[in-house]
Amino acid sequence: MPAGPDDQAAVFEAARPMLLGLAYRLLGSRADAEDAVQDTFLKWQAGERDGIASPAAWLATVCTRHCLDMLRAADRSRVDYVGPWLPEPVHAVAPDDPGTDEAMAASLGTAFLLALQRLTPRERAAYLLREIFDRPYPEVAATLGMQEAACRQLVARGRGHVERARVRHVTPAPLQRRLLAAFRDAVESGSTAVLARLLADDVRLTADGGGRATATRRVMRGPEVLRFIEAGLHVWWADAHLEEVALNGGPGLLVRHAGAVTAAVSFGFAEDGAVADVFVMRNPDKLARLEPAVLR
């Protein structure tokens, strides 16, 4: 007996966290990821499903191909972006899934997403499908419309790049919380003595205003990061409320002025646990969709 509308909807909803997680990692934008998932849903509703052996594979294929089309357009438009570009922050809520672990959460980190941005769209898709979502090579090759041998080469190139960037390790949660407390104290007090001991010598601070909000347009490095926190953030955020939330797979901060979110802060860690990156999102367009999202 063919599946009814309720069964079809249930199949899609079960796959939604995976699809949203895949699309977000591919695109770096929650808004675009939700558009891609919605387009996938419309095609699922309109398509002939009787011959589909694996609904999850079919949905992942449709979603991936739509994301690749979106990436081609995004790569053309990003040359006009004002200042450094950062992925749209996401307040991720893990699904009720025993397969969701710390490594999966770490693959939402901003540093990891930036490393993916340096891959070609097809390398990015192949790497994510195989290495993060554990799809078999024949399925990945079919999704990308290529031979399996060529697909394996794409995955190998992506894996090599991510390994060289050293952004896929898992940082212990207590260390992340300790850093968050020290950063918050430094902003509120203007003293960076405790925070300094947690930062790598060559720590970077990257801010994304997108030409829509005031933000430094160059990446700060080393000691100037501490001076920027002491003389800049301590003053500008003096009357702000700092709210601790889960951002991009780890603890982060939302900065609120009069209730409105004006910044989001997340961190990247080196393999030894030192803070390698501070990411500050100021672009209001990318701060507009920070309600919790369930994604794998």
Image (cartoon, rainbow, N blue to C red):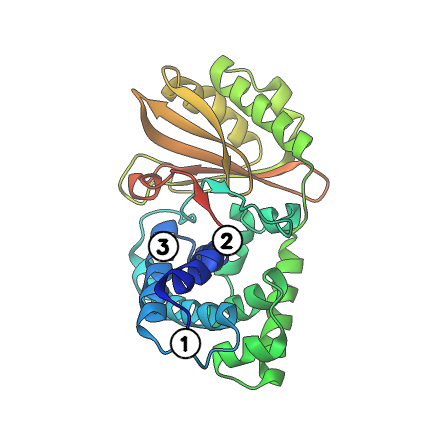
Q: Nearer the viewer, residue 211 or 242?
A: 242
Q: Earlier in the sequence, mark 2 or mark 3?
A: 3
Dot 2: few (<14), some (14–19), or many (≥20) neighbours within 10 Å? some
Q: Residue tagged by mark 2? A: 114
Q: CA distance from mark 2 to mark 1?
A: 36 Å
Q: Amino acid at mark 2?
A: Leu
Q: Is residue 225 left or right of residue 207?
A: right
User: Can you say whether 165 is above or below 39 in the image?
Assistant: above
User: Can you say whether 165 is above or below 195 in the image?
Assistant: below
Q: Is residue 77 left or right of residue 169?
A: left
- Identity of the residue drawn at 45% across and 68% down: 59
Q: Residue tagged by mark 3? A: 34
Task: From the top left corner, tell me how far across and down residue 268 is, in percent.
Answer: 58, 41
Q: Residue tagged by mark 1? A: 49
Residue 21, can we see it?
A: yes
User: Can you say whether 143 is above or below 40 in the image?
Assistant: below
Task: From the top left corner, tell me how far across and down residue 107 is, in percent.
Answer: 58, 51
Q: CA distance from mark 1 to mark 3?
A: 22 Å
Residue 26, can we see it?
A: no
Q: Quadrant of residue 159?
A: bottom right
- Identity of the residue drawn at 59% across and 38% down: 203
Dot 1: few (<14), some (14–19), or many (≥20) neighbours within 10 Å? some
- Indicate which label's residue lies in the foreground, 2 or 1: 1
- Identity of the residue drawn at 62% across and 55% down: 165
Question: In what element is the residue under mark 3?
Answer: helix
Q: Amino acid at mark 1?
A: Arg
| Extreme-right residue of the structure | 272
